[in-house]
Amino acid sequence: MKKQKVNVKLDTDFGGIVLRNTNNASKLLHPLWIRERTEGPADFDTINYQRLYDHSTLPADLKITQCEVTDCDRLDVEFNDGYQSNISLTKIQHEIGWRENPEDLPVPKPWKTGFKFSDHVKWSNLNDPLNLKAMLDDFLTYGFCIMRDTPTERDCLLQLASRFGYVRDTNWGKIFNVETKPDATDAAYKDVALAAHTDNPYRDPIPGIQFLHCLTNDVSGGLSTLVDGIAVADRLHDEEPEQARILEDVIVRYRYQGPSAILENFGPTIERDHIGIVRRIRLSSRVDFVPALDPKTLNLFYAGRRRLNELSNSPEFQISFPFRPGTLLMMDNYRLLHGRTAFDGKQGHRLLQGCYTDHDGVCSLYKLLANGRDLTSVARED
């Protein structure tokens, strides 16, 4: 999206501002909308950019009485209550979609089995902010990243994951071990194959990003599998739009009941954002309970869920890779479904450690790097 010259004109009737670009597109901006974005010294805190006033105290009949574009790509404005300030024309164009914003997150790209993914992101290379931003760009675009040559000391995952966000604590602790256990409280702790699923749909909030870190693996089998939830949801919508819509409409209960916790949460199987992109998949066949709806609705729901499961476990959509000591998988738990092939737990030892963070750490780090900050991990404030 190229930079365009913008004409600015005061709308004397409404008291707002009319922008017009070289493509002859126009936009009328409300005076209160402008006032809430002015950037004078009395408008925003210069450290955290929070407003220094409560916008509910602004006059309801606020109007702009004067406006002038300066040589510095800024717009000086005066309001009918006598207040004068200025605002960045570039920021206005970013917000209304007339110019690309470097802070905008990459648009997710669906992928299937033929997708050529990289499992050669070397951990030490991420000490370069440019490499780190490129890695985050791929993660936000495709929903996962596979890193290698990480340290393999037990519990070092806390430090590794903290590079990208703030580690969540759960009833399993900040770190959980994925290895075969007697009297296992979760199927992940057995040596059986795991169908494609998303983690912890019963938590509120659902963990956004999952990390799996391989410390030891000398068994055959146990390949990790990944599936793009956007791709399978879009395929279901193309094949059976009614089934897809019912999975978006019906609110399902997800429940975990273990020795230390009873956890419940509710939500649709497929969730789209305000522009129609699939933003979250809740697919976990061991913990979901659909409400007692009428038979016609449930027939449609069960057919859609069955087909979504089939697609999620189809070779057409699935990629797989082995975990080796030092491998670190980072995946978007809202978007990706993951699983594994079976392995023989008596043959040797397979130990992964896992943890969860939320999306805000990754998104914040990406935006800071896009603004030219020289960072190699999320920032923390005192």
Image (cartoon, grey):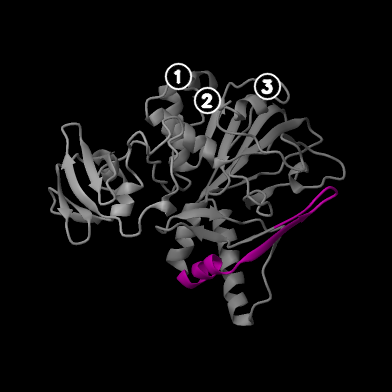
- The front one of 235 and 60 is 60
User: Compared to 252, does 52 lie above or below?
Assistant: above
Verify whether residue 258 appears in magenta.
Answer: yes
What residue did someone put label 1 on? 128
Report the residue at 27% width, 46% height from top: 82
Position of 365 with respect to 333 (left or right) is left
Q: Residue 106: x, y in percent?
A: 39, 41
Write down the region rendered in magenta. 241-264
> SS class of the residue under badge 1?
loop
Residue that lies at the very extreme toward the front in this rendered image: 82
Query: CA gap, disc 3 to disc 1?
Result: 21 Å
Choose top left, top right, bottom left or bottom right for residue 254: bottom right
Report the residue at 48% width, 38% height from top: 363
- State the quadrant of the N terminus: top left
Q: Residues within 10 Å of mark 1 (few under 14, many from 20)?
A: few
What residue did someone put label 3 on? 152
